[in-house]
Structures are given as structure tokens and as C-alpha cells.
């Protein structure tokens, strides 16, 4: 286990073994992702790829919801018109 120290400016040096394991190089951007267990540090490009994969079907899902709502509204309107 490596235990880096937080400086007065709240900076931490990422230990070599961690940098190498994560593929982080000088100048790379990283993100701190909150999980149920705590925080995970990830290279920004890896995080963005994961988010792109997770959200790949969102447009289709939103369109499916819109179509479902439209069908429900049409059904409700026809029931109201038939009830007169």
C-alpha cells in the first residue's frame, strides 16, 4: 500500500505503481468518480468512453418513451370522445 500525503494546496502525487496501472502520464486529465464504496480515479478518456457506451441507446429510449406517451394520449382522448 502506498500512502501519499496531501499538501497545503490539497495536491497529491499519484504513486508510480498507480500511474502505471491506470496508464496515466504527465499532462493527462483524470476524474474522481463516486461509487458506493468510495471514490475511484480514472483517466478522463477512459471515463468518457464508458459514459458514451452507457448512453449509446439513450436517443432510442427517449424516442420510445415519446411514442409510448403519444399512444397513451391518443388512447385517453379516444376514450374521452367515446364517453360523450
Image: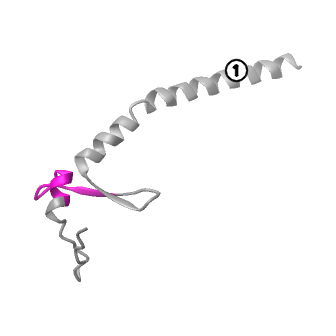
Residue 24 within the segment the image draws in magenta = yes
Residue farthest to the front? 1
Q: Quadrant of residue 80?
A: top right
Residue 40 within the segment the image draws in magenta = no
Q: Nearer the viewer, residue 44 or 62?
A: 44
Which quadrant, please, contains the N terminus? bottom left
Q: Secondary structure at mark 1?
A: helix
Q: Nearer the viewer, residue 33 or 2?
A: 2
Residue farthest to the right? 84
Picture layout, residue 74 above or below residue 29: above
Mark 1 — residue?
74
Q: Position of residue 12 (x, y in %)?
A: 21, 72
Please give the name of the residue rendered at 37% of the width and 61% of the height, measured from the top-left corner. 39
Which quadrant, please, contains the C terminus? top right
User: Is 54 left or right of 48, judged from the image as shown?
Assistant: right
Q: Nearer the viewer, residue 26 or 59?
A: 26
Please give the name of the residue rendered at 40% of the width and 36% of the height, measured from the top-left corner. 55
Q: Position of residue 54 (x, y in %)?
A: 40, 37
Please give the name of the residue rendered at 22% of the width and 74% of the height, measured from the top-left corner. 4
Picture layout, residue 43 above or below residue 75: below
Looking at the rendering, the stretch of residues picked out in magenta corresponds to: 18-32
Category of crowding for the residue at label 1, using alpha-carbon neighbours closer than 10 angstroms: few (below 14), some (14–19), many (at least 20):
few
Q: Quadrant of residue 68?
A: top right
Please give the name of the residue rendered at 30% of the width and 47% of the height, measured from the top-left corner. 47
User: Is 14 left or right of 69, judged from the image as shown?
Assistant: left
How many numbered marks appear? 1
Q: Position of residue 66 (x, y in %)?
A: 57, 28
Residue farthest to the left? 26
Colour scheme in use:
one colour
Q: Nearer the viewer, residue 25 or 17?
A: 17
Q: Position of residue 72 (x, y in %)?
A: 69, 24
Amino acid at each position: 500500500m502506498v500512502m501519499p500525503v496531501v499538501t497545503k494546496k490539497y495536491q497529491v502525487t499519484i504513486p508510480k505503481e498507480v500511474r502505471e496501472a491506470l496508464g496515466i502520464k504527465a499532462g493527462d486529465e483524470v476524474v474522481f468518480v463516486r461509487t458506493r464504496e468510495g471514490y475511484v480515479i480514472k483517466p478522463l478518456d477512459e471515463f468518457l468512453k464508458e459514459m458514451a457506451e452507457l448512453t449509446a441507446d439513450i436517443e432510442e429510449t427517449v424516442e420510445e418513451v415519446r411514442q409510448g406517451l403519444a399512444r397513451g394520449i391518443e388512447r385517453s382522448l379516444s376514450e374521452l370522445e367515446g364517453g360523450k
